[in-house]
Image (cartoon, grey):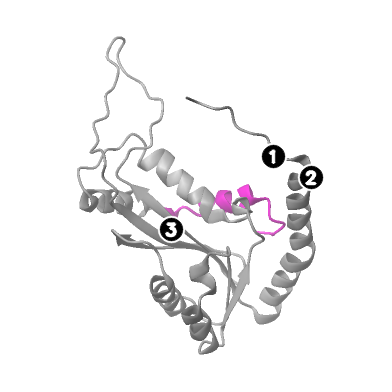
Amino acid sequence: MVFPPQKPERRAVERDDEVVRQWLDRQWTRIKRLVRRRRAHLVFIDETGFLLAPLVRRTWAPVGQTPVLRQRTRHHRKVSGIGAITISPQRRRLGYYLHLHRDGSIGQEQVIAFLRDLLRHLRGDVVVVWDNLSAHRGRKVREYQARTPRLHLEYLPPYAPDLNPLEYSWSHTKMNGLANYCPANVDELHEAVTGATECIPDEQELLRGFLRATRLPIRL
């Protein structure tokens, strides 16, 4: 049985919108001042999962020959990804970084490894903006930040994924390079994700599009 989606209470929606407005007015303004004062890289980070089940999209086919997608059922293996979109201090160039992990979720160890690798590529201070995932606020991450003075961690408001440009990059990859794709195993999926994302760092206009989609008040 299929139930129609329930409309949220109007009061709850207004409260969430107000939280986002307050965050933009106060926290985002403060973050931008911090970035300017430190001449820092502004970095957005997020995580996602790539599943063996295909993301089905409408496509072309000869009349009377409906395409058939064959997939392995009851199979929960996946490729987890943690990625970053970076903005240089001069706001002239955007960067894209990605770590992929077969058959596992992103925990604090994977987050720290990604941050460590990111800091090897970016000179000077780095201001990270990400969501309130427990792996972002864990003890090990806090200890790593305390040992790394040039790393600054900032948090998005709750339930506001649309403010993170990585969300749009994940959608772009899954709805384009991986749409209607049925990998035979997790190794094949890992290779496909790598191929679907390898050109993104060179596509400056595409990266700018991800940032514009957030509607964050930032000048590029």
Magenta span: 200-220
The mark found on residue 201 in the picture is 3
Residue at x 27% of width, y 49% of height: 189
Residue at x 45% of width, y 61% of height: 83
Q: Which residue is mark 1?
A: 8
* Kind of residue sitting beneath label 2: Arg
Q: Position of residue 34 (x, y in %)?
A: 70, 76
| CA distance separating discs 3 and 2 | 41 Å
* Residue closest to the eye, 122 or 141: 141
Q: Are marks 2 and 1 in contact (CB under 8 Å)?
A: no
3 or 1: mark nearer the eye: 1
Residue at x 38% of width, y 32% of height: 56
Taking the magenta stretch, the answer to whether it contains residue 9 is: no
Task: Give the quadrant of residue 117.
Answer: bottom left
- Tell me which numbered mark, 3 or 2, is placed earlier along the sequence: 2
Q: Kindly give the residue lying farthest to the top in the view shown.
A: 64
* Kind of residue sitting beneath label 1: Pro
190 to the left or right of 12: left
| CA distance separating discs 2 and 1 | 8 Å
